[in-house]
Amino acid sequence: MPLQDITARIAKAEAAAGRPAGSVKLIAVSKVQPDERVEAVLQQGHRCFGENRVQEAAGKWPAFMERYEGIDLHLIGPLQTNKARQAMELFHAIHSVDRPKLAKTIARLAQEMGKCPDLFVQVNTGEEEQKAGVMPAEADSFIAECKALDLPVRGLMCIPPVDEEPSLHFALLAKIAERNGLSDLSMGMSDDFEKAIALGATHVRIGSAIFGERVKPQG
Ligand SMILES: *Cc1c(COP(=O)(O)O)cnc(C)c1O
């Protein structure tokens, strides 16, 4: 689907929810997409992208950043502590802060580097065993721990279980953010971003609806 169709759908969903135009940021998820598809979206003037692997992003984004001004790159996949420094150098936001060890590592590196990306705490709203994210019952204390480390936590992120109504998960995430005084919500993907916007998403992460089906699985 062309980029402008997605941005039009976002604008419509913002209006339907009574939210200001432009209050939702579109993160175009370019993982595993061929460079020419990414380039086509860059040429249309879009600058905000999401990747879920540090290694893959490090292999393709520095070259794009040399050629296009103002790229805003978001890490939306799990982060290992040994890749934290590289991630903090490359990304402007990290959406997958989900455990004390990682939070402490980021805090230490932020001191050392004198800068830190915007951070989102990932919440495992479906309490799925295989999925990253802090459990909902532990979210408040983990967020407090991050704040005590002086981390720039802007909001929360979730990936609802594939076989459940996403709105319940979006509503839960919004509730946890509200009671912790966090403004930003990273939620909503190709199939459910309008529902996420209705429930307060500030960042939607859309891949296949923009770029087409991913050509190869990640492995
Ligand atoms: C791949 C991915 C997306 C985008 O998924 P689509 O269904 O292609 O829109 C969003 N968020 C995360 C965390 C992802 O890994």
Image (cartoon, rainbow, N blue to C red):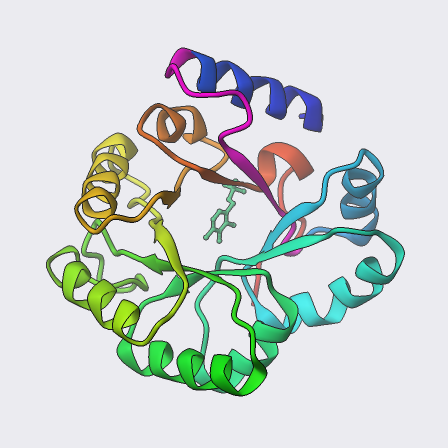
Q: Is residue 114 above or below residue 124?
A: below
Q: Quadrant of residue 122?
A: bottom left
Q: Is residue 152 left or right of residue 83?
A: left
Residue in view at x 76 percent, y 52 percent: 34
Quarter of the image for the N terminus: give it.
top right
Image position, residue 138 (x, y; %):
14, 63
Which quadrant: the C terminus? bottom right
Relative to 81, residue 135 above or below: above
Q: Position of residue 127 (x, y in %)?
A: 18, 56
Residue positioned most to the left: 137
Q: Position of residue 159 (x, y in %)?
A: 35, 48
Tell me what residue is drawn at x 43 percent, y 24 percent: 194
Q: Main structural element of the magenta stretch: helix, strand or loop?
A: loop
The residue positioned 62% from the left and 40% from the top of the image is 213
**Left or right, 153 with reference to 136:** right
Q: Is residue 177 magenta?
A: no
Total number of numbered discs in the rendering: 0
Q: For the magenta stretch, what is the residue range?
A: 16-32
Task: In this rendered view, identify the residue nearer to me: 195 or 181.
Answer: 181
Q: Is residue 32 left or right of residue 146?
A: right
Q: Is residue 6 above or below residue 213?
A: above
Residue 36 placement (x, y as % from top left):
84, 47
Q: Residue furthest right?
A: 67
Asked if residue 139 is positioned above or below residue 183 in the image, the reply reads below
Q: Residue at x 22, y 35 (%)?
A: 171
